[in-house]
Amino acid sequence: MKCLICQNLAFKLICNDCDKQIKITPKARKSFDNFMVYSFFDYQDIEYLLKSKYSLIGSRIYKILARKAFLYFKNEISDTFKNLNIHSIGIDDKVKKYYSHSGVIINEFRHIFKPLFGSLISTNNIHYAGQSLQYRQNNKKDFIYKGRSGIDAVLFDDVITTGLSIKEAREVLIKNKVNVLFALTLTDARM
């Protein structure tokens, strides 16, 4: 098999040398109402990998990225969350093209946060990739929440751009009595 990045022969989807070049570069952004969103990778470093989410191989690529993010989080931050009953909720966690990209991400963090798979779903089949802020504001995702109430949770998504999806998801969760602590994304497209 060939490495997806360098095209050299490899036993893995991304060879060890290329994997080492995908660096963790943690960032934090205050979103609406001073809500904190943390990300792990520079957007320009993984942009081509993120585009794989529209194909079946994306599940394997997202697993690699989420695993790197989880290991960083576990080594640097997770002691704060030991023995706490915190859940993870993926934004629009529904199966598209044979897998859920947010489901892959929250599954990697399952040793710290209890995943609530498929609990926050958009009722509009809207894609924001490449769309303007005006388009995003005019076309809400109309999330519905089918999970437990009265819990603490962390929101997960692959990319934050304008923050509107996270804002809308958080509002729906708050209405359903979910205390959303913060959000984790693989990358921030604005930073």
Image (tube, helix red, strand yellow):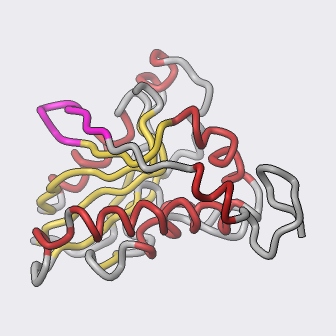
Is 42 included in the stretch rendered in magenta? no
Q: Position of residue 141 (x, y in %)?
A: 45, 42
Q: Position of residue 96 (x, y in %)?
A: 66, 61
Between 35 and 151, which is closer to the camera in this rendering? 35
| Quadrant that contains the N terminus | bottom right
Q: Position of residue 55 (x, y in %)?
A: 76, 57
Between 139 and 26, which is closer to the camera in this rendering? 26
Q: What stretch is highlighted in magenta?
A: 27-36
Q: Which residue is drawn at 30% across and 56% down?
A: 155
Image mark count: 0
Question: Compared to 169, does 113 lie above or below?
Answer: below
Q: Residue at x 71, y 51 (%)?
A: 52
- 132 left or right of 27 in image: right
| Quadrant that contains the C terminus | top left
Q: Position of residue 148 (x, y in %)?
A: 22, 75
- 146 left or right of 55 in image: left
Between 113 and 82, which is closer to the camera in this rendering? 82
Q: Residue at x 37, y 57 (%)?
A: 156
- 113 left or right of 71 in image: left
Is 30 included in the stretch rendered in magenta? yes
Q: Residue at x 44, y 59 (%)?
A: 121
